[in-house]
Amino acid sequence: VGPTPRRAAGGNAAWLSAGEQAAWGELRRLLLVLPSVLDARTSRETGLSFFEYQIMASLSEGPDRALRMSELAEATCSSLSRLSHAVGRLESRSIVVRRRCDGVGRSSLAVLTPRGYRKLVAAAPFHVAAVRALVVSALTTEELSTFAESARRVVERLDAETPTKP
Amino acid sequence: VGPTPRRAAGGNAAWLSAGEQAAWGELRRLLLVLPSVLDARTSRETGLSFFEYQIMASLSEGPDRALRMSELAEATCSSLSRLSHAVGRLESRSIVVRRRCDGVGRSSLAVLTPRGYRKLVAAAPFHVAAVRALVVSALTTEELSTFAESARRVVERLDAETPTKP
DNA sequence: GAAGATTGACGGGTCAATCTTA
DNA sequence: TAAGATTGACCCGTCAATCTTC
């Protein structure tokens, strides 16, 4: 990483320009605050965490309201391990059931139950309202779209910098 | 929240326009992926989580490399509880010490030790490099500044929507 | 009693190890 | 052996209760 420079500490402008540092500060605040506020609000209102809601919403879009665990992990941007724990909890609440995947024996299929679907329908307005109130309504349509495009570019970079197989 | 509409589930475009939904999808991915990648990378490289780094960097900028816990919570966007746990762990590693605050008896002061400062200096290049590689370098200067401005607006909205005292 | 801070229990995510099927 | 998935241990953040000082 090269020689250790003087005055490295403090988060000062050692290797980030003032503008870059300010920008990162704003983004850092967003990363820190938004997920927790969103999650606290929706959990309180609906009894479903934001992540659980994503799982259920993804399942509801799959054929027969079902997806393979690995597909679900992809859809929710989560690790298989995290997902497996979460689905286990949802299963104990009778919101989801797991079955062996027909034809592809080593896969397993997560299925949204009727009860789960009803819960999802009931929770949806709250989740959508939270996203609208906390994010969408803060920006104009054009700003939102530009913002999303930048987010996409950063995620793209993340994927490139995180080689699953180097 | 009004009547429960038909076709509420599935994350479809029920109450978010297609554009809004797409934008939220991108932002959601960013919120889900960036913190964990950033944290995993810096923890592995330096033995300090991103949050611990923020604590130490904030302290290094305070007078005598010290801040009151409530000031530090503000600087790191964290709850006092989370901070207290984290500082406790840093204290057990001799990176920080806590003292009663002179003059303001009920406050306590977190102080970065010389050892902590050396660790911070050693870790800084890695943290800055991660931010640069994963975020800053993905966008042009202008895009980054626009992005940050939008992030700031959303956080502003968050603060407004999260009344500490209604 | 309120502000600043701490504590402990609980819920949930990560990592590494493991199991199973191809 | 590799892919898909699960499990358990450990770490950390949240929430509510508590303690201390004003």
Image (spheres, coloured by chain):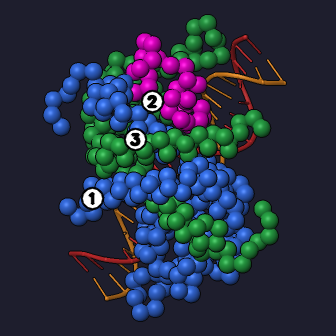
Chain colours: A blue, B green, C orange, D red
The reply to whether dot 3 and dot 1 touch (C-beta < 8 Å) is no
The amino acid at mark 1 is Ala
Residue B145: which numbered mark, if any?
A: 3
Q: Chain of mark 3?
A: B
The residue where tag 2 is placed is B55
* Front tag of 2 and 1: 1
Label 2 – label 1 distance at C-alpha: 29 Å
Q: Quadrant of residue A122?
A: bottom right
Q: With respect to residue A120, does A98 lie above or below? A: below
Image x and y of residue B51, in percent: 44, 37
Q: Which residues are magenta?
A: B57-84
The residue where tag 1 is placed is A160
Along the line of sight, which residue is nearer the eye, B90 or B35? B35
B84 horizontally vs C22: left or right:
right
Along the line of sight, which residue is nearer the eye, A31 or A136? A136
Q: Chain of mark 2?
A: B
Image x and y of residue C8, in percent: 64, 39
The amino acid at mark 2 is Ile
Residue A95 in view in this figure? no
Look at 27% across and 59% down and name the residue there: A160
Is B76 included in the stretch rendered in magenta?
yes
The amino acid at mark 3 is Ser
Label 3 – label 1 distance at C-alpha: 23 Å
Q: With respect to residue B97, does A81 lie above or below? A: below
